Amino acid sequence: MWRSLSLLSLSVTSFMLSAQCDSNVDSAVLKQQNPTISAITFQRNNVFDLDEKGIFWLHRFANASHIISTEETIRDDLLFSEHAPLKLSELAETERLLRSRRYLRDARVEVISYCAGDNSVVVQVSTWDNWSLLPKIDFSSEGGETKYSLGIAEDNLLGSGNQIQLDYAKDSERTGYLLSFASPNIFGSHWNTLVSYANNSDGENYQFALQRPFYRLDSAWAFNFDLLKNKEQVTDYLLAESVNEYDRTRSQFESSAGFKLAAHGQSIQRLLFGLTLEDVSFSEQADTVLPLPAERNLSAIWLEYQLLQDDFYKLYNINQFNRVEDINAGWQLRLRLGYLQPWLGADDDGLQLKLNLDKAWQLQAQTWLFAELSYDRLAWQNTRQELWHLALQVNHQLNARNSVMASISAERGRNLFADEALYLGGDSGLRAFPLYYQRGDNRMVATAEYRHYTDWNLWQIFDVGFAAFTDVGRSWGANTRFDDTSSLQSRANVDDKILFGVGVGIRLLSSHSSRGTMVHLDLTRPVTDNPDISSWQWRATAKRRF
């Protein structure tokens, strides 16, 4: 009897408590009451919503063959826990962290119930998976030469968030394979790792990285260990045509540790210290016709100061479309001072300075200005090398389906390394001109673009947008490398001026892919006196920006 009465009393108490729970939660009330988190629930969604219109066998097959991100994988990224006090800032930061994972298309972290009786809340974590198994097949044949690559990448192995990639490639220069593995969050420890190995016919490339980043705004410390060897072909171009080739081998080791200095309101200060061992060497190949660049060793110890302001916004149609973009409008400063050390292998004593500064402003309700400034300086071997970079971008949303964007980017360099010239054309600006069309120590490019975002969706795979754009720019000041070759110097004078191009294009966003690739199909027209460039031309590229 007493047991029955106890169960009845417990049931009545539970009912009374549940009656005091409210699903209509006011954030102002939550901030005032300071409740605790009684439970965390998870809603994990597959790649496609099978209840949407236009669903057919492909979407059902994709869902059936895809392993949804496990609850453990999602839980490992949470910055809060049960029975802890509720902090709305931690929910918002967790949401941004989850959205940064490429295997997730979107994430939402919210309070779904507040119980006044025991002053507690229930938090729900909702995630939407991306399609993460990506086969790779490339083939081309031109001028009697054939190149191809076959591979596969899985960005969410067994729903764990781990990434694995295997590629085999063959072209006229080399054959080889690549195997890589990456884990963004090892066993929920907030450590991440990358292991990559490539065995090519002309040498081996490898990388091993182990890192515990400042994974949240108020992380107390961070650590980094990175070992890299990379051998690659470097090509000198004039008017988009190869005029010289050689191999560059970079061997690098970097290790650093950092800690939080202080936090005042929304501002966080950090200090890092580390060392970098960097050796760059060059070797000739069959198409090398010019002297090789000078080898260099820039090994150094360094100290870095960081200032970060927490002022995040959820924006749309800035660099992507039809998806949330987490953008920090606060000041972000990085200042690194390095000392080149011969005892570490450096060729000479020297001083390195690196500065990065980012900020965004909301000029009007639908208008944003984004600014980026960087400065690199190297005082070494009686020379001074400098590179300034300034970028400004304005986005104005006309309405839900249309926006305009204007940007300007400028670099001014001095005594840059011969293998690090600034190219202009194609993906680096001036889309109406081929890649690597102009080169120099200085570069400027300005763009004006109209964008239209449709509600069209091709087979629930591609979101469709349109663009019309104008580009103007120039790269200049680095043709001294060709001064001793009269035939090359004469070609360098073609289109040695400010260039102009216009175009229209289609944007196809792979809306359910873990790589978030956006296919650009552009019809462009350059203004040029070069007879080798046609007046109108099609170009197709894959990017992660509109």
Image (tube, grey):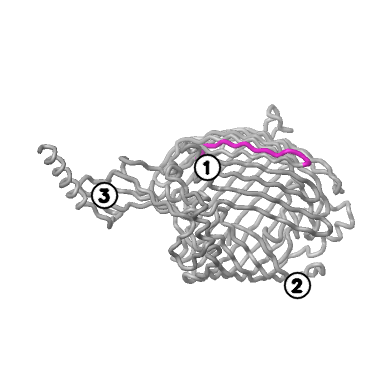
Secondary structure beneath label 3: helix
Secondary structure beneath label 2: loop
In the image: residue 80, left or right of residue 328: left
Q: In front of the other: label 3 or label 2? A: 2
The verdict on residue 132 being magenta is: no
Q: Which residue is mark 1?
A: 184
Q: CA distance from mark 3 to mark 2?
A: 65 Å
Q: Residue at x 49, y 52 (%)?
A: 104
Residue ranking furthest to the left = 1
Three-letter code for the amino acid on which mark 2 is drawn: Ser
Q: Residues within 10 Å of mark 2 (few under 14, many from 20)?
A: few
Residue segment shown in magenta = 201-213
Who comes first in sequence, dot 3 or dot 1?
Answer: 3
Q: Residue at x 56, y 64 (%)?
A: 462
Q: Which residue is mark 2?
A: 535
Who comes first in sequence, dot 1 or dot 2?
Answer: 1
Q: Is residue 225 above or below residue 125?
A: above
The N terminus, quarter of image: top left
In the image: residue 39, left or right of residue 323: left
Q: Which residue is nearer to you in this view: 280 or 331?
A: 280
Could you tell me residue 190's position as x and y percent?
A: 48, 38
